[in-house]
Amino acid sequence: MKLKLDLHTHCWEATRYAPPSLDIARRIVNQIKEKGLDGIAITEHHSSKYSYTMKELIAQVAPEVIIIPGQEIDGPWKEQVVELFLPDGATFRFWAHPFRLDYTDLNYHIRGPVQGIEIDNPMHTWHLDRPAIRAYAEKHNLLLLSDSDAHYVEDIGRFHNEIDLAELSRLGRNGNGLKSQDV
């Protein structure tokens, strides 16, 4: 079943680093529902702790809303990869806002291959070469994604994907995707 999901948000930053609370959870849920989404991934920089805490709080406010815990990690060449920790234990990884497509080893810094790449991201529109990203994704069998990269609550859901969560899990479990030897 296809769901409307924004897979790249920074809710802690979007709430000006307010500590997790039911009030913050309600604010995030209101935005998710206002945008007509089924859920979001919470992908703070370098840690998934906040995302797991918010998942628990949002479940108290709106158990029907899907929250995927994750994190955004930096690589040695300033590239960033988002890791999504899916309910069945799979990890789906995607290249966030790629600004160059000539890395010799994208996976040098991560724990596994990437299975997706952002083609739309309003925070980085100015440098996304969509035709090149599309060709790169096709060459490396990467799922194309459109995400908000929200740094403000009102930007959550500005871009989103219509995607099957089971497909993300399948891709994350089998490890298919871009590997360093493929580049």
Image: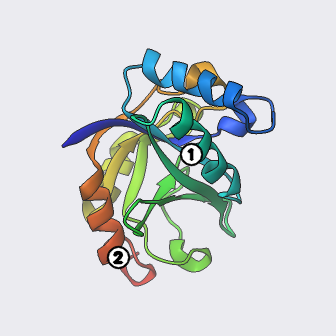
**Residue furthest top as drawn:** 34
Query: According to the image, label 1 marks what residue?
Result: 55
Label 2 belongs to which residue?
A: 175
| Relative image position of residue 88 (x, y in whole percent) | 37, 65
Q: Using the rendered view, name the quadrant where residue 34 is placed.
A: top left
Q: Please state the horizontal and vertical placement of residue 39, each as a whole percent of the image.
A: 42, 36
Q: Mark 1 belongs to which amino acid?
A: Lys
Q: Is residue 45 visible?
A: yes
Q: Relative to 92, say whether 60 is above or below.
A: above
Q: Residues within 10 Å of mark 1 (few under 14, many from 20)?
A: many
In the rendered structure, which amino acid carries the disc numbered 2? Gly
Residue 63 location (% of width, % of height): 44, 36
The CA distance from mark 2 to mark 1 is: 25 Å
Identify the element where label 2 is drawn.
loop
How many numbered callouts?
Answer: 2
Tag in front: 2 or 1: 1
The answer to whether 57 is drawn above or below residue 89 in the figure is above
Q: Which mark is residue 66?
A: none
The residue under the point 52% across, 32% down is 125
Left or right: 81 with respect to 166? right
Is any atom of residue 104 visible in this view? no
171 or 54, which is in the foreground? 54
Residue 18 in the figure: left or right of residue 42? right
**Colour mapping:** rainbow
